[in-house]
Image (spheres, rainbow, N blue to C red):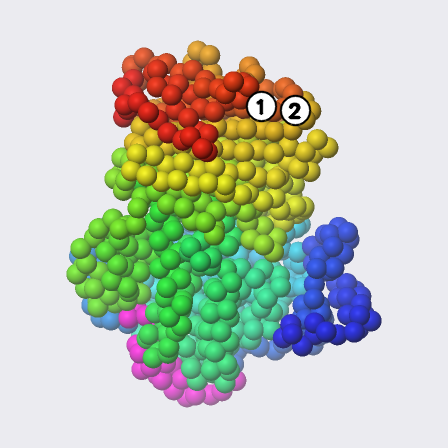
């Protein structure tokens, strides 16, 4: 569509820009940011946004009558339900309709089955585990507009009059939406299929019927995001299939739910996130359209929705997934989301006899290749960028970084032994999505670690992975040399340029602090700031300044200068331009050397002309940190430690910050809505630039072993180029990289 408008006369384009600016804008962003964004739009985007605002106005003036109890006789409703019962097994995921599923679940995953039933019982009792929160109560009957964490309730006005980011008025919309995704409906359906207990069906369908009655079409917070409508209709599709044989699914209720699915899909199609959030919002909405068209093919718009959803998924994936398999938002959580979306789409295509582009199959596998490369030695994806705590459809209880379900499903789908190795066994998701045949395909594989080298560069995404192998007790470091989030806004990216995360003996020592929440401005700002990451800060400034909760005032760039990987060492050299905005522009360059399998050395050069404050920050996870003599520090997890020893061209002041509120420092968030104090070491100096710091990171097993001897290695002009470890030089000059001596013996691994 863009090509039709690009050559429009300037007067026409200016008129359209004024029209777009005149439409009501949700969120109340400062006018200068709206004007700046408007200048970036081409005429196609302006026209699209204008049409969408006009549609919102029309919907307010002439509200839809859908989602009321559908017209038709009881006989019509009964016939529709009978037709659905007959057709569902051929259109839907095999495990939901195969009679062998309950027995196979009980024998292959007994613990997961017990967890499933316990969670379903909590939902029946009105207690919901959502995101990082447990046992939330929304009242009896449920108040579908309530955020029980803040106690705030969204008013039941037209959805376009609500700003989901206005936490002072509405509370945290994420919490409200998580309940209203109705993913608990799937858990109750799984419990019903597993046990045959009608109480699960009765509770689930009573909740849905109450929701339909309490949520008028187009009104309230639950209509304010097309993604949320898409996820809800997906859950309804699962619910209809899982409860299709239950007496609790009365023909009249079935017809009402089917009409609501049709209404949701129509809303999603009208308000696609083509311009607002063309990321997982758009792909999730596309999947919702495809679900509606594939699962209920008799709907008048079913074919159009299937084709529209498939087309968006193909186009968006080609744009969002980089050639090396990294998702463009620089977020492992949203990368996993995208893998889930594509797996559901591809499996539904196979079940419905529809062809899917081979490029999508390849991209799914490339995305998992990246997740396996950065995966921690103990099996979890590291937190990189934002993580909102959600899943496309939680078919088993999973921690935020748990990749076993997606890896197991992809292993069975593509016959990949390395994915099976990462799954660690037959995950329940395999059975629900692929049925007994998928389980058999998985169990026929011989799991094996990836054939790719453990240390790898992902050049398009900007990640360097250094690891000594694939063992559970291995050493592993991820070096971020990529951009700040996606090109549009960087909204889910963090100000983490040149940061590192580090595992020693399989334990997470240096971590990304996580996300915390989207709803509290102070915590939102902290968790995505440079202060929450293991990198260098200058003058107390984050590498980027927020322009709202999901945008940045500027998008600094990082550049990889060199990458070398051999059997004995890995070396990466990178810099970034984030601090060029300072009155005295500053450049940060970081070099990282891994002498396998013993230790890492970091060399940070901070270049400028004036006097600046420089903070070398290390954010730790749930470990104990103690400062030693000089600038030594020891982080301990059980009997295993990581030694930290920086040496600078000027004196350094060392401090441990943990759980500080003024300023916020020393916090981590394991899941959305959670935060825990965790130690951060800050090495500070205020001095004229240039300034260099060389840092040893050494895993050690023996906590009583003496500290190794460490001295700086410098050029004749005094600039640091490495260090001397137990008498052996370790050089990080790009022209002369290496460690000449034998592996150190000072209590090292």
Where does the image place residue 192, in percent across and percent down from the top left? 30, 64
Q: Which residue is drawn at the image coordinates 61% and 53% (left, top)? A: 489
The majority secondary structure of the magenta stretch comes to helix
Q: In terms of secondary structure, where does tag 1 sit?
A: strand
Q: Which residue is drawn at the image coordinates 32% and 39% (left, top)? A: 566
Between the residue at mark 2 and the residue at mark 1, the CA separation in whole angstroms equals 10 Å
Quadrant assignment, res 359: bottom left
Report the front residue among 693 and 673: 693
Q: In terms of secondary structure, where does tag 2 sit?
A: strand
Where does the image place residue 699, in percent across and percent down from the top left? 33, 26
Q: Does 406 sit left or right of 584 as displayed?
A: left
Q: Can residue 250 be spotted in the picture?
A: no
Q: Which mark is residue 691?
A: 1
User: The C terminus lies in which quarter of the figure?
Assistant: top left
Q: What is the crowding at mark 2: few (fewer than 14 residues within 10 Å), some, or many (at least 20)?
A: many
Where does the image place residue 305, in percent across and percent down from the top left? 49, 77
Q: Magenta residues?
A: 71-96
Q: What is the crowding at mark 1: few (fewer than 14 residues within 10 Å), some, or many (at least 20)?
A: many
Q: From what the image shows, is residue 607 above or below residue 716?
A: below
**Is residue 79 on the magenta stretch?**
yes
Report the front residue among 479 and 665: 479
Q: Which mark is residue 612?
A: 2
Q: Are marks 2 and 1 in contact (CB under 8 Å)?
A: yes
Where does the image place residue 347, in percent across and percent down from the top left? 34, 69
């Amino acid at each position: 569509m863009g090509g039709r408008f690009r050559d429009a006369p300037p007067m026409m384009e200016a008129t359209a820009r004024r029209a777009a600016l005149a439409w009501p804008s949700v969120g109340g962003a400062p006018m200068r940011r709206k004007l700046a964004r408007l200048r970036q739009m081409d005429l196609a985007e302006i026209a699209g946004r204008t049409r969408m605002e006009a549609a919102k106005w029309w919907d307010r003036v002439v509200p839809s009558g859908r989602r009321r109890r559908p017209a038709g006789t009881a006989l019509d409703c009964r016939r529709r339900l009978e037709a659905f019962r007959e057709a569902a097994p051929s259109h839907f995921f095999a495990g939901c309709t195969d009679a062998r599923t309950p027995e196979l679940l009980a024998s292959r995953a007994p613990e997961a089955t017990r967890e499933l039933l316990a969670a379903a019982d909590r939902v029946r009792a009105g207690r919901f585990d959502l995101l990082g929160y447990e046992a939330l109560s929304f009242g009896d009957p449920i108040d579908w507009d309530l955020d029980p964490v803040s106690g705030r309730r969204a008013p039941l006005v037209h959805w376009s009059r609500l700003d989901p980011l206005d936490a002072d008025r509405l509370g945290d919309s994420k919490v409200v939406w998580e309940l209203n995704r109705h993913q608990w409906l799937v858990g109750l359906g799984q419990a019903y299929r597993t046990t045959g207990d009608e109480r699960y069906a009765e509770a689930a369908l009573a909740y849905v019927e109450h929701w339909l009655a309490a949520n008028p079409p187009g009104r309230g917070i639950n209509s304010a995001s097309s993604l949320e409508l898409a996820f809800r209709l997906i859950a309804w599709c699962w619910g209809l299939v899982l409860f299709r044989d239950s007496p609790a699914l009365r023909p009249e209720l079935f017809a009402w739910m089917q009409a609501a699915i049709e209404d949701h899909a129509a809303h999603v199609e009208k308000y696609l996130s083509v311009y607002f959030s063309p990321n997982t919002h758009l792909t999730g909405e596309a999947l919702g359209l495809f679900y509606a068209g594939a699962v209920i093919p008799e709907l008048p718009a079913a074919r159009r929705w299937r084709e529209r959803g498939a087309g968006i998924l193909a186009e968006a994936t080609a744009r969002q997934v980089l050639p090396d398999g990294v998702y463009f938002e620089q977020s492992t959580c949203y990368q996993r989301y995208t893998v889930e979306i594509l797996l559901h789409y591809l499996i539904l295509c196979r079940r419905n006899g529809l062809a899917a582009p081979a490029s999508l199959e390849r991209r799914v596998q490339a995305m998992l290749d990246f997740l396996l490369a950065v995966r921690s030695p103990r099996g979890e994806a590291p937190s990189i960028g934002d993580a909102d705590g959600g899943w496309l459809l939680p078919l088993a209880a999973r921690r935020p970084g748990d990749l076993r379900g997606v890896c197991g499903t992809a292993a069975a789908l593509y016959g990949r032994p390395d994915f099976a190795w990462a799954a660690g066994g037959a995950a329940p998701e395999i059975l629900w999505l692929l049925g007994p045949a998928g389980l058999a395909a998985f169990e026929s594989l011989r799991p094996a670690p990836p054939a790719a080298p453990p240390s790898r560069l992902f050049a398009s995404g900007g990640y360097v992975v250094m690891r000594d192998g694939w063992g559970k007790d291995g050493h592993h470091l991820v070096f971020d040399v990529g951009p700040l989030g996606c090109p549009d806004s960087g909204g889910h990216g963090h100000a983490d340029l040149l940061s590192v995360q580090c595992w020693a003996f399989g334990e997470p020592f240096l971590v990304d602090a996580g996300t915390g929440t989207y709803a509290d401005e102070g915590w939102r700002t902290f968790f995505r700031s440079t202060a929450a990451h293991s990198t260098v800060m200058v003058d107390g400034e984050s590498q980027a300044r927020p322009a709202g909760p999901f945008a940045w005032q500027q998008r600094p760039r990082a550049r990889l200068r060199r990458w070398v990987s051999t059997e004995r060492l890995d070396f990466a050299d990178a810099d970034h331009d984030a601090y060029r905005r300072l009155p005295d522009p500053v450049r940060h360059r970081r070099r990282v050397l891994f002498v396998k399998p013993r230790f890492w050395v970091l060399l940070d050069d901070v270049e400028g002309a004036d006097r600046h404050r420089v903070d070398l920050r290390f954010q730790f996870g749930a470990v104990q940190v103690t400062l030693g003599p000089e600038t030594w520090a020891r982080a301990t997890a059980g009997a295993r430690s990581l030694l930290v020893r920086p040496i600078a061209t000027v004196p350094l002041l060392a401090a441990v910050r943990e759980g500080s509120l003024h300023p916020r420092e020393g916090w981590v968030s394991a899941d959305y809505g959670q935060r825990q104090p965790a130690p951060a070491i800050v090495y500070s100096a205020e001095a004229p630039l240039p300034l260099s710091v060389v840092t040893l990171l050494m895993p050690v097993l023996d906590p009583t072993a003496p500290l190794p001897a460490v001295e700086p290695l410098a050029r004749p002009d005094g600039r640091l180029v490495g260090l001397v470890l137990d008498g052996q030089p370790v050089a990080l000059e790009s022209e002369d990289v290496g460690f000449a001596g034998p592996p150190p013996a000072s209590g090292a691994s």
